[in-house]
Image (cartoon, rainbow, N blue to C red):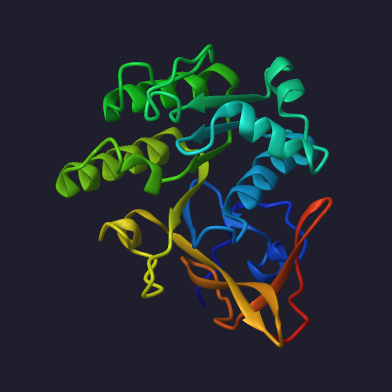
Amino acid sequence: MEEEIIFDRVKTGIPGLDGILHGGFIRGNNILVSGSAGTGKTIMCLQYIVSGIMNYNEPGVFVTSEELPYELRREALQFGWDLKKLEEEGKLIIIDAASAKAGLPTDEKYAIKRGFEVNELAEQIYTAVNQIQAKRLVLDSLSGLDIKINDPQALRVAIFKISALLRELGVTSIMTSEMLEDHSFSRYGVEEFIAQGVILLYLKEQDGELRRSLIVLKMRSTAHSLRRYPFEITSLGIVVMPGEEI
């Protein structure tokens, strides 16, 4: 009789989601979270990082390529998450990959300052992870990188390089991507290869009101349902309701 393989799990800290995932993400895996604008991708990422720090003593790195760091800190405060305090305590590092893309100066300690170059981003990630011995990382988002890398092939190579680095560093990571109009989560043709898990977020009208839901499309080495689960964004963050129908 074969022995059952037991994987080390990383709890997301998102109510309702860990139960669906039988305890959370497998440690060291890359997870792709894809959805259209307004579905809650950034909030899910913030909640994952903050919960890791506050509840599981797992420092985190947050790479932001779309929102400026001050916007990210301001958004987090709406849920009671004081990112600045966590940064000052040496438990969180925010890497600013958004200012250079927008042609803006930045005072951030960790930032891409020479325009977007994948090697510089990889260097910043490597330094930040080792600086605080980070266990979790977020890259929000892959979609935000393509404005600076107009060559699709070069962008695919960049995504592969970053993904390989994250696996080498052993962090459990979330990467976000904008879902296309045809509801395809693969914008660049490589996401399904670099991600061991895929979660799709939706915002659709139902009975005259907009409702949020998610589907766990893929989660390697984890048995899971393919049904749609409703979730809400509350004052404390995202809450998934696995027992409710949608």
Q: Which image quadrant for residue 127?
A: top left
Q: Residue at x 65, y 49 (%)?
A: 43
In the rendered view, tell whether residue 232 sits above or below residue 59. below
* Depth order, front residue of 221/73: 73
Depth check: give the residue in front, 80 or 130. Answer: 80
Left or right, residue 79 beside residue 5: right
Residue at 34% over, 62% down = 192
Q: How many marks?
A: 0
Q: Name the quarter where the C terminus is drawn.
A: bottom right
Please determine whether, in this image, residue 234 is positioned above or below residue 172: below
203 to 68, vertically: above or below: below
Determine the residue positioned at 28% across, 35% down: 148
Query: Does residue 156 appear left or right of residue 87 in this picture?
Result: left
Which of these two is toward me, 26 or 94? 94
Q: Seen from this angle, which residue lies furthest front? A: 208
The image shows residue 21 at horizontal and vertical percentages of 63, 67
Residue 128 in the image: x percent, y percent?
A: 50, 21
Residue 198: x and y in percent read 47, 64
Please, is residue 173 above or below residue 134 in the view? below
